[in-house]
Image (cartoon, rainbow, N blue to C red):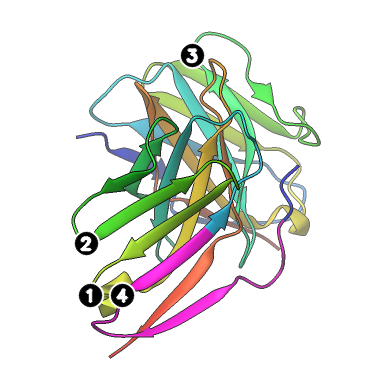
Amino acid sequence: GESVGLHLPTLSVQEGDNSIINCAYSNSASDYFIWYKQESGKGPQFIIDIRSNMDKRQGQRVTVLLNKTVKHLSLQIAATQPGDSAVYFCAEDSGGSNYKLTFGKGTLLTVNP
Amino acid sequence: GAVVSQHPSRVICKSGTSVKIECRSLDFQATTMFWYRQFPKQSLMLMATSNEGSKATYEQGVEKDKFLINHASLTLSTLTVTSAHPEDSSFYICSARRRDEQYFGPGTRLTVT
Protein backbone atom coordinates (compact mmCIF):
# COMPACT_ATOMS: atom_id res chain seq x y z
CA GLY A 1 0.00 0.00 0.00
CA GLU A 2 0.86 3.67 -0.15
CA SER A 3 3.40 4.86 2.39
CA VAL A 4 2.32 8.06 4.05
CA GLY A 5 3.91 10.06 6.81
CA LEU A 6 2.43 12.10 9.62
CA HIS A 7 4.05 15.32 8.45
CA LEU A 8 3.50 16.75 5.02
CA PRO A 9 6.49 18.19 3.17
CA THR A 10 6.13 21.94 3.13
CA LEU A 11 7.10 24.71 0.76
CA SER A 12 6.93 28.34 1.72
CA VAL A 13 7.26 31.05 -0.95
CA GLN A 14 6.74 34.76 -1.30
CA GLU A 15 3.85 36.08 -3.32
CA GLY A 16 4.91 36.57 -6.92
CA ASP A 17 7.67 33.95 -6.81
CA ASN A 18 7.55 30.78 -8.84
CA SER A 19 6.86 27.52 -6.98
CA ILE A 20 8.08 24.05 -7.86
CA ILE A 21 6.48 21.04 -6.21
CA ASN A 22 8.01 17.64 -6.78
CA CYS A 23 6.63 14.13 -6.71
CA ALA A 24 8.18 10.70 -7.12
CA TYR A 25 5.82 8.06 -8.43
CA SER A 26 6.12 4.37 -7.91
CA ASN A 27 4.71 2.45 -10.86
CA SER A 28 6.71 2.47 -14.07
CA ALA A 29 3.62 1.17 -15.90
CA SER A 30 1.55 4.25 -15.01
CA ASP A 31 0.61 6.18 -18.10
CA TYR A 32 -1.48 9.05 -16.80
CA PHE A 33 -0.63 11.57 -14.09
CA ILE A 34 -2.63 14.30 -12.46
CA TRP A 35 -1.92 17.15 -10.07
CA TYR A 36 -4.62 18.07 -7.57
CA LYS A 37 -4.99 21.02 -5.22
CA GLN A 38 -6.75 20.45 -1.90
CA GLU A 39 -7.76 23.31 0.33
CA SER A 40 -8.45 22.67 3.99
CA GLY A 41 -11.67 20.74 4.54
CA LYS A 42 -12.41 20.34 0.84
CA GLY A 43 -12.10 17.67 -1.82
CA PRO A 44 -9.24 17.59 -4.34
CA GLN A 45 -9.50 19.97 -7.28
CA PHE A 46 -8.03 19.06 -10.68
CA ILE A 47 -5.16 21.31 -11.79
CA ILE A 48 -3.45 19.71 -14.74
CA ASP A 49 -2.71 16.29 -16.17
CA ILE A 50 -0.15 14.69 -18.44
CA ARG A 51 0.12 11.40 -20.29
CA SER A 52 3.26 9.31 -20.43
CA ASN A 53 3.86 10.09 -24.11
CA MET A 54 4.59 13.71 -23.16
CA ASP A 55 7.28 15.25 -20.98
CA LYS A 56 5.78 18.70 -20.54
CA ARG A 57 2.36 20.27 -20.52
CA GLN A 58 1.40 23.84 -19.81
CA GLY A 59 -1.75 25.36 -18.47
CA GLN A 60 -2.63 28.76 -17.16
CA ARG A 61 0.22 29.66 -14.75
CA VAL A 62 0.99 25.97 -14.26
CA THR A 63 3.36 23.59 -15.98
CA VAL A 64 3.77 19.87 -15.36
CA LEU A 65 7.01 18.10 -16.19
CA LEU A 66 7.33 14.34 -16.42
CA ASN A 67 10.61 12.45 -16.29
CA LYS A 68 9.85 8.80 -16.84
CA THR A 69 13.48 7.75 -16.56
CA VAL A 70 13.60 8.61 -12.87
CA LYS A 71 9.82 8.40 -12.28
CA HIS A 72 9.57 12.03 -11.30
CA LEU A 73 6.82 14.55 -11.74
CA SER A 74 6.89 18.25 -10.96
CA LEU A 75 4.36 21.07 -10.85
CA GLN A 76 5.51 24.59 -11.52
CA ILE A 77 3.29 27.49 -10.51
CA ALA A 78 4.22 30.85 -11.94
CA ALA A 79 3.69 34.10 -10.02
CA THR A 80 2.36 32.30 -6.97
CA GLN A 81 -0.56 33.98 -5.25
CA PRO A 82 -1.95 33.67 -1.69
CA GLY A 83 -4.93 31.80 -3.14
CA ASP A 84 -2.53 29.08 -4.27
CA SER A 85 -1.89 28.12 -0.64
CA ALA A 86 -3.09 24.53 -0.28
CA VAL A 87 -1.89 20.94 -0.24
CA TYR A 88 -0.87 19.66 -3.65
CA PHE A 89 -1.02 15.98 -4.53
CA CYS A 90 0.25 14.13 -7.52
CA ALA A 91 -1.69 11.04 -8.55
CA GLU A 92 -0.85 8.24 -10.96
CA ASP A 93 -3.19 6.04 -12.88
CA SER A 94 -1.81 2.58 -12.42
CA GLY A 95 -3.44 1.37 -15.59
CA GLY A 96 -6.06 -1.26 -16.24
CA SER A 97 -9.74 -0.79 -16.85
CA ASN A 98 -10.62 0.54 -13.39
CA TYR A 99 -8.77 3.86 -13.69
CA LYS A 100 -7.63 3.63 -10.08
CA LEU A 101 -5.57 6.53 -8.83
CA THR A 102 -2.69 6.26 -6.37
CA PHE A 103 -1.99 9.50 -4.56
CA GLY A 104 1.39 10.76 -3.45
CA LYS A 105 2.08 12.14 0.01
CA GLY A 106 1.24 15.74 -0.79
CA THR A 107 3.06 19.01 -0.29
CA LEU A 108 1.75 21.92 1.74
CA LEU A 109 2.34 25.17 -0.13
CA THR A 110 2.20 28.37 1.90
CA VAL A 111 2.32 31.68 0.05
CA ASN A 112 3.39 34.64 2.13
CA PRO A 113 2.01 38.04 1.10
CA GLY B 1 -20.15 20.53 -15.69
CA ALA B 2 -18.83 17.42 -13.89
CA VAL B 3 -20.02 18.28 -10.40
CA VAL B 4 -19.99 15.71 -7.62
CA SER B 5 -21.80 16.30 -4.36
CA GLN B 6 -21.66 14.55 -1.01
CA HIS B 7 -24.14 14.48 1.81
CA PRO B 8 -23.78 15.12 4.64
CA SER B 9 -20.75 17.39 4.73
CA ARG B 10 -20.28 16.71 8.44
CA VAL B 11 -21.69 14.05 10.72
CA ILE B 12 -21.18 13.17 14.35
CA CYS B 13 -22.36 9.80 15.55
CA LYS B 14 -22.06 7.69 18.67
CA SER B 15 -19.83 4.66 18.84
CA GLY B 16 -21.66 1.54 17.71
CA THR B 17 -24.09 3.27 15.39
CA SER B 18 -24.08 3.28 11.59
CA VAL B 19 -23.86 6.27 9.30
CA LYS B 20 -24.58 6.59 5.58
CA ILE B 21 -22.77 8.96 3.24
CA GLU B 22 -24.16 9.75 -0.22
CA CYS B 23 -22.17 10.61 -3.32
CA ARG B 24 -23.96 12.01 -6.36
CA SER B 25 -22.82 12.99 -9.81
CA LEU B 26 -25.06 15.96 -10.55
CA ASP B 27 -24.70 16.49 -14.27
CA PHE B 28 -23.31 13.28 -15.67
CA GLN B 29 -23.74 9.55 -15.33
CA ALA B 30 -20.98 7.62 -13.64
CA THR B 31 -20.71 3.87 -14.01
CA THR B 32 -17.74 3.94 -11.65
CA MET B 33 -17.33 5.84 -8.40
CA PHE B 34 -14.53 5.64 -5.89
CA TRP B 35 -14.42 6.04 -2.12
CA TYR B 36 -11.36 7.42 -0.35
CA ARG B 37 -10.47 8.02 3.27
CA GLN B 38 -8.11 10.74 4.41
CA PHE B 39 -6.65 11.15 7.89
CA PRO B 40 -5.30 14.54 9.02
CA LYS B 41 -2.11 15.62 7.26
CA GLN B 42 -2.13 12.46 5.18
CA SER B 43 -2.86 11.50 1.62
CA LEU B 44 -6.01 10.03 0.15
CA MET B 45 -6.25 6.28 0.49
CA LEU B 46 -8.53 4.41 -1.89
CA MET B 47 -11.00 2.26 0.00
CA ALA B 48 -13.09 0.76 -2.78
CA THR B 49 -14.29 1.05 -6.34
CA SER B 50 -18.05 1.19 -6.72
CA ASN B 51 -19.55 -0.12 -9.95
CA GLU B 52 -23.16 0.52 -10.87
CA GLY B 53 -25.21 -2.63 -10.70
CA SER B 54 -22.48 -4.84 -9.29
CA LYS B 55 -20.55 -5.44 -6.11
CA ALA B 56 -17.88 -3.00 -5.04
CA THR B 57 -14.22 -3.91 -5.25
CA TYR B 58 -12.43 -3.28 -1.98
CA GLU B 59 -8.77 -2.48 -1.52
CA GLN B 60 -6.62 -4.74 0.59
CA GLY B 61 -7.18 -4.20 4.29
CA VAL B 62 -10.59 -2.55 3.93
CA GLU B 63 -13.38 -4.53 5.62
CA LYS B 64 -16.26 -4.91 3.21
CA ASP B 65 -18.70 -5.81 5.99
CA LYS B 66 -17.85 -2.63 7.86
CA PHE B 67 -17.86 -0.26 4.90
CA LEU B 68 -20.93 -1.15 2.86
CA ILE B 69 -21.09 0.34 -0.61
CA ASN B 70 -24.17 0.47 -2.79
CA HIS B 71 -24.12 1.92 -6.29
CA ALA B 72 -27.82 1.75 -7.04
CA SER B 73 -27.96 4.13 -9.97
CA LEU B 74 -25.69 5.86 -12.46
CA THR B 75 -25.66 9.01 -10.33
CA LEU B 76 -25.62 7.72 -6.76
CA SER B 77 -23.26 5.67 -4.62
CA THR B 78 -23.58 5.31 -0.87
CA LEU B 79 -21.04 4.36 1.77
CA THR B 80 -22.37 3.06 5.07
CA VAL B 81 -19.97 2.84 7.99
CA THR B 82 -21.44 0.15 10.21
CA SER B 83 -20.86 -0.10 13.97
CA ALA B 84 -18.67 2.98 13.84
CA HIS B 85 -15.84 3.42 16.32
CA PRO B 86 -13.70 6.46 17.12
CA GLU B 87 -10.89 5.13 14.89
CA ASP B 88 -13.29 5.43 11.93
CA SER B 89 -13.31 9.20 12.41
CA SER B 90 -11.89 10.58 9.19
CA PHE B 91 -12.57 12.62 6.06
CA TYR B 92 -14.35 10.48 3.47
CA ILE B 93 -14.17 11.61 -0.14
CA CYS B 94 -15.86 10.16 -3.18
CA SER B 95 -15.09 10.62 -6.83
CA ALA B 96 -16.97 9.80 -10.00
CA ARG B 97 -15.38 8.80 -13.26
CA ARG B 98 -16.34 10.40 -16.54
CA ARG B 99 -14.29 9.12 -19.46
CA ASP B 100 -10.65 9.19 -18.30
CA GLU B 101 -11.07 11.72 -15.51
CA GLN B 102 -12.17 11.52 -11.90
CA TYR B 103 -14.20 14.33 -10.36
CA PHE B 104 -14.09 14.61 -6.60
CA GLY B 105 -16.79 15.45 -4.13
CA PRO B 106 -16.28 17.99 -1.34
CA GLY B 107 -15.80 15.31 1.32
CA THR B 108 -17.65 14.25 4.48
CA ARG B 109 -16.13 14.77 7.90
CA LEU B 110 -17.12 11.85 10.16
CA THR B 111 -16.58 12.12 13.89
CA VAL B 112 -17.40 9.12 16.07
CA THR B 113 -17.74 9.88 19.77
State whether residue B97 is above or below residue B41: above
Asked if marks 1 and 2 touch (Cβ < 8 Å), the reply is: yes
Residue flagged by tag 4: what amino acid is it?
Asn
Q: Which residues are magenta?
A: A4-22
Disc 2 to disc 4, how far (Cα)? 9 Å
The residue lying at 38 percent from left, 16 percent from top is B74
Q: Callout 3 environment at 10 Å: few (<14), some (14 to 19), or many (20+)?
A: some
Asked if marks 2 and 4 touch (Cβ < 8 Å), the reply is: no
Q: Position of residue A77 (x, y in %)?
A: 31, 66
Residue flagged by tag 2: what amino acid is it?
Arg
Q: Nearer the viewer, mark 3 or mark 1?
A: 1
Q: Quadrant of residue A75?
A: bottom left
Query: Which of these two is toward me, A103 or B60?
Result: A103
Which chain does the residue under circle 2 lie in?
Answer: A
Which chain does the residue under circle 3 lie in?
Answer: B
* Same chain, labels 2 and 3: no
Asked if marks 4 and 1 touch (Cβ < 8 Å), the reply is: yes
First reached walking from the N terminus: tag 1 or tag 2: 2
| Residue assigned mark 3 | B52
| Residue assigned mark 2 | A61
Disc 2 to disc 3, how far (Cα)? 38 Å
| Residue assigned mark 1 | A79
Q: Which element is circle 1 on? A: loop
The residue lying at 25 percent from left, 77 percent from top is A81
Image quarter (top left, top right, bottom left or bottom right) of the C terminus of chain B: bottom right
Q: Callout 1 environment at 10 Å: few (<14), some (14 to 19), or many (20+)?
A: some
State whether residue B50 is above or below residue A43: above
Residue flagged by tag 1: what amino acid is it?
Ala
